[in-house]
Image: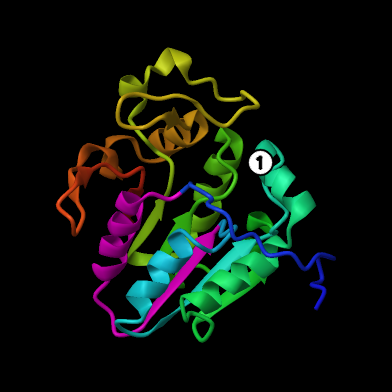
Amino acid sequence: MISFFGKNRIFKGNYAAFSPYDRLALKMIVGSIDKPFKRMIEIGSWTGNGSTTAIIEELHKGDGLLYCVDTWKGNRNVKRHQDMVREYDMFGTFMHNVAKARGQDFVKPIVMSSEDAASVMSDNVFDLVFIDADHSYDETLKDIRLWLPKVVPGGIICGHDCEARPEDAGRERLVRHKDEDSIDGNDVFVRFHPGVILAVDECFESGCHLWAYDDITLDDGIVGKSAIWDMKKS
């Protein structure tokens, strides 16, 4: 069956973008929402095999909905995204992974840009917004500003790929309008995402919690760090 993107080949390779530490951190964030029904939205879902399935696993423990916003056309500033779009049906890949995780009953895909989706969503609706779309400074800043009003008071806005505070990443290296979305990292994170680091700092400063500064212990006892960031809306 041909998808509306004109391809029928599902990507089944290893897309290493969401670590086991990221998965556990996000699951703990979702698990901290003390509501019988959780309403959540993810901005940037891509293959559906990272943050999407982590949230699905938590929803299996309770009840709720996860809206997933993406164009499934990839970020223009990420070459491997564009390579994958040429070869694979990325929306089909997303739906395949959602079904594999048994999430089709509570995952609602929205094929739109972040800006278009935000324009049709009411404010104060979501218990959690997770941002993991275009990692450039301008787009990350815009996503935070677009989606923060959509979070209920006391709810959580969070995202991915914030590996350090600017002073620890080397503020002089963090070029806001650089085309590339990552630079060399440190002994914990191979790559830093300057756009995300700078945008999160500009919006929240030290009030934002970075899991990069916490030890996270997996079930097998291995300790590591996560690039997840989160902030509770007052």
Percent coordinates x, y for residue 82 in the rendering: 73, 44
**Residue extending furthest left?**
221
Percent coordinates x, y for residue 84 in the rendering: 70, 49
Write the residue at 29% across / 55% down.
25
Q: How is the image coloured?
A: rainbow
Q: Nearer the viewer, residue 96 or 103?
A: 96
User: Dot 1, how many residues are within 10 Å of its Cα: few (below 14), some (14-19), or many (20+)?
Assistant: few
Q: Nearer the viewer, residue 41 or 119?
A: 41
Percent coordinates x, y for residue 86 in the rendering: 79, 50
Q: Is residue 117 above or below residue 136?
A: below
Q: Amino acid at mark 1?
A: Arg
Asked whether residue 16 is in view, the answer is yes
Write the residue at 58% across / 35% down.
136
Please identify the quarter of the rendering in which residue 113 is found.
bottom right
Q: Is residue 199 above or below residue 5?
A: above
- Judging from the image, what secondary structure is the residue with disc 1 in? helix
Q: Is residue 131 above or below residue 139?
A: below
Point out the stretch of residues depicted in magenta: 18-43
Q: Nearer the viewer, residue 94 or 106?
A: 94
User: From the viewer's perspective, is 210 left or right of 92?
Assistant: left
Residue beneath label 1, please?
80
Percent coordinates x, y for residue 48 in the rendering: 54, 64
**For the C terminus, which image quadrant?**
bottom left
- The reply to whether the magenta stretch includes residue 151 is no
Write the residue at 58% across / 55% down.
13
- The reply to whether the magenta stretch includes residue 37 is yes
Asked whether residue 127 is in view, the answer is no
User: From the viewer's perspective, is 88 left or right of 50?
Assistant: right
User: From the viewer's perspective, is 107 left or right of 92?
Assistant: left
